[in-house]
Image (spheres, rainbow, N blue to C red):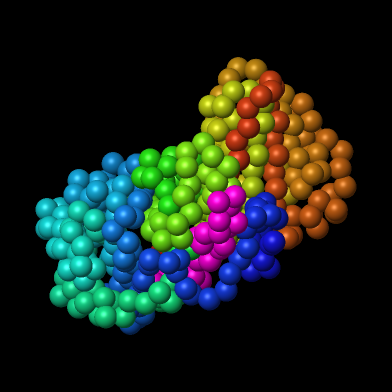
Amino acid sequence: MTGAGFFSSRWVSCPEHVAELSGDRLPAGFRAAGVAAGIKPSGAPDVGLVVCDSPGVSSAARFTASGTQAPPVLVCRERCELGALRAVVVNAGNANAATGRAGYDNAVRMQGAGALAAGVAEDRVAVCSTGVIGVQLPMDRVNRGILAAAHALSPEGAGAFAAAIRTTDAFDKRARLQARLPSGTVEITAQAKGAGMISPRFATLLVFVQSDALLSPETCDLLLSVCLKRSFERISVDGQLSTNDTVILQCSGESGVRVEPESEDELRFGEALDALLRQLSLLVVRDGEGARRVGRVVVRGGDQPTVGAAARAVADSPLVKTALHGADPNWGRIAQAVGAALPGTAPLALDIAIEGVTVCSAGAAAPHDADALAAAVAGDEVEYEVSLPGEGAESEVYFSDLGHGYVTVNAEYTT
């Protein structure tokens, strides 16, 4: 059963055993809240809290690969039991990044305040921050926000939490799904934020997923790793890697539906999680600061490192991205990006197709209907296909266009 709301892209299908649910209710065992603590100058919600009331929770987490990881990421890596996280505390409007020892100590204090608010041990609390880099957290406001969020915790708090984690996001990115597994029915919810500083190596974002399925920490870790490789590691807005990227999956087990390793339940749960994360990642790309269109580049042939490098080069190319913004089917920019990624002394006999129309064959221009192609690239989603010599490997990246809005947002971000 496919819902009409969340699965909005032609590139991601809702699995047959998955249904979209309405409302803000979290899976059994979870409560959440989002409040305004005065960290954002706008007065918008900026502190969020998610708590799992099940002591048998299992979880998994992934973080940025940046060499300048923010203190909240370091605290999670160094002070958290990542397989059994009971709570997540988040602030928006301040990244607490490049803040030195004082920033680390503030992240530890934030973790402690989250632990008191949730009534759990400190090592069961993940801490996340997002916003401006290089500014110390206003801990008095953060602490007041965490206390207020604790009083506002509700099983219906997913929407408020999603609003509280936004920065330059134009809209909430969240979903509520029901998955029918062979052993029973489970629910999965998710909230994400991200619009700029998005790189294919990972995305500048925070993503939180909750389920009432019963999984081991090892199964959580495996499924999260596999699904991230097909979603948030396959997108680009501007090719910039963030200091604060965090993705956390928590499973309360309250449904009683046990997902055993290498079972049909694991396969079906994984399919639901995969579709969820892929569509969420596309929403991040669609919300790319000032973006008008989303592109998908698929590169086939050669070996995996080759096609991966070519796909990322196309997705990150400002020339390709500005052409996408202007609905300009300028395939020469695609050829240039691939050539720059795969330098050599002999011309590449590559094929290029845009929206199924072959524009380049064996490295040379191919006859095509220019008017029909111009109309095809004027839509919200545009697909590019590149074929390299050889066969057997394939790589894809989803990316946003690059227009005046991106410059405006980032030229004025701290002023």
**Which quarter of the image is occupied by the C terminus?**
bottom left
Rendered view: 384 above or below 210 = above
Location of residue 334 in the rendering, given as x and y in whole percent from the top left corner = 65, 40
Instruction: Give the residue drawn at x 35%, y 51%.
Output: 58
Q: Quadrant of residue 53?
A: bottom left
Q: How many marks?
A: 0
Using residue 234 as the reference point, say whether residue 145 is left or right of it.
Answer: left
> Residue 166 lies in magenta, yes or no?
yes
Using residue 72 as the reference point, say whether residue 277 is left or right of it.
Answer: right
Location of residue 237 in the rendering, given as x and y in whole percent from the top left corner = 51, 53
Instruction: Give the residue drawn at x 66%, y 24%.
Output: 392
Q: Quadrant of residue 221?
A: top left
The reply to whether residue 114 is visible in this rendering is yes
Q: Nearer the viewer, residue 262 or 108?
A: 262
Q: Nearer the viewer, residue 154 or 40?
A: 154
Using residue 365 as the reference point, say whether residue 76 is left or right of it.
Answer: left
Location of residue 147 in the rendering, given as x and y in whole percent from the top left corner = 21, 77
* Furthest-top residue in this view: 345
Q: Magenta segment, which residues?
A: 161-188
The reply to whether residue 71 is visible in this rendering is no
Location of residue 141 in the rendering, given as x and y in whole percent from the top left corner = 20, 76
Q: Nearer the viewer, residue 41 or 273?
A: 273
Instruction: Give the residue drawn at x 79%, y 30%.
Output: 361
Q: Nearer the viewer, residue 273 or 72?
A: 273
**Which quarter of the image is occupied by the N terminus?**
bottom right
Instruction: Give the residue drawn at x 69%, y 62%.
Output: 2
Rendered view: 29 above or below 273 = below
> Residue 54 lies in magenta, yes or no?
no
